[in-house]
Amino acid sequence: MPVSGEWFSPTELTFSGIHVRAKTEWVHLSIGDGTGIVGQGEITSTQLASDVAPVVARLANRLRGHRLTDDTDVMRLNGLTVENLEQDQILATAVSGLRCAIVDALSQIAQLRLVEYLRELDGRDHGDNDSIQLYANINRSMLANDDGLVDRSPDSFAGMAQRAIEAGFTTLKCAPFDEVKAPFTSSGLPRDAEMGLDRIRAAKAAIGTERKLLVDCHSRFDLESALALAPELYEAGVGWYEEPVDPITFPDDLRAIRNAADLPIAGAEHGYGISLFTNLMEEEVLDVVMPDVKFCGGPVEAY
């Protein structure tokens, strides 16, 4: 639904990439109408099984010659349903990138900043709040770079955490359980989790009790091991427990973990659509949902 009658008719599609690290290339799409209006979206496929760009090109071709007034026109003109996108992450990423680019273009045509455009679409009164708190993901800077592996020792985690604090961040996040991957051959807390706990303790000691350290487990655990890990994270002073298991694939397991843990449970960054996130909250699977505009359907869904 347009804010003030604006519409956008794309005629151009281009892709661009930014080399970040050894295995990370950020990929963006741009759609333009030939008048100088260009909308941007991200379709990075590092975490996916195949390239997203060919899917974007196919979907975008169906948009040519149409006046788009809503980012969901991508779905309508391609005959897609939410169910299609919930079941196919590559397709969901392509749609999310295009939806992001369309709403970006529409906000430019309406002569509004994107956040202002989203507020107009949403219709709720958000007061004068024009900012959100960010956290520093110290894990990204400690992944393998073009020269090979980097030091991921507890001391290195502590040093990177200290750098984030010096940069002004009060909340940090890390993914420390490199060595862990379910299923396991023994019960309880896997021995391979000990190095991850040492990294957490070192980082937390570096930032102090007044600052938050969030922990992302990248769904590396199963129900039993995640239950065993929860009190260790609580004792270490962790701020939230993110995706010990996949909340979309194993919602019942994660609900059991949430019920047993004394920590907020976060996750679902790979999910699509507001209905999914609403269900995860209403069914008490998660305390914190994490819609990622790259996967969830773009900024309108996330907002």
Image (cartoon, rainbow, N blue to C red):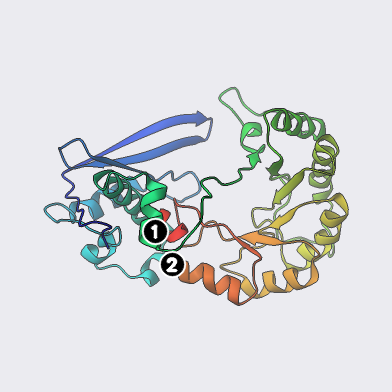
Among the 4 quarters of the image, the one containing residue 42: top left
**On the rendered structure, is 223 left or right of 104?**
right
Q: Secondary structure at mark 1?
A: helix
Whether residue 213 appears in this view of the structure is yes
- Picture mark count: 2
Question: Quick one: label 1, few (<14), some, or many (20+) residues within 10 Å?
Answer: many
Mark closest to the chain's N terminus, 1 or 2: 2
Work out whether residue 286 or residue 124 is closer to the camera in this orientation and state it: 124
**On the rendered structure, is 127 left or right of 139?**
left
Q: Is residue 254 above or below residue 214?
A: below
Cα gap from disc 1 to disc 2, whole angstroms: 7 Å
The percent coordinates of residue 258 (x first, y second) are: 73, 69
**On the rendered structure, is 134 left or right of 270?**
right
User: Which residue: 23% across, 63% down?
Assistant: 78
User: Can you identify the residue that label 1 sits on?
Assistant: 92
User: Which residue: 73% across, 44% down?
Assistant: 176
Whether residue 90 appears in this view of the structure is no
The percent coordinates of residue 193 (x first, y second) are: 80, 50
User: Which residue: 21% across, 53% down?
Assistant: 6
The percent coordinates of residue 175 (x first, y second) are: 69, 45
Q: Amino acid at mark 1?
A: Ala
User: Can you identify the residue that label 2 sits on?
Assistant: 86
In the image, farthest residue toward the top: 147
Among the 4 quarters of the image, the one containing residue 199: top right
Work out whether residue 40 or residue 269 is closer to the camera in this orientation and state it: 40
Tell me if label 1 and label 2 are in contact, CB under 8 Å: yes
Q: Secondary structure at mark 2?
A: helix
Work out whether residue 269 or residue 104 is closer to the camera in this orientation and state it: 104
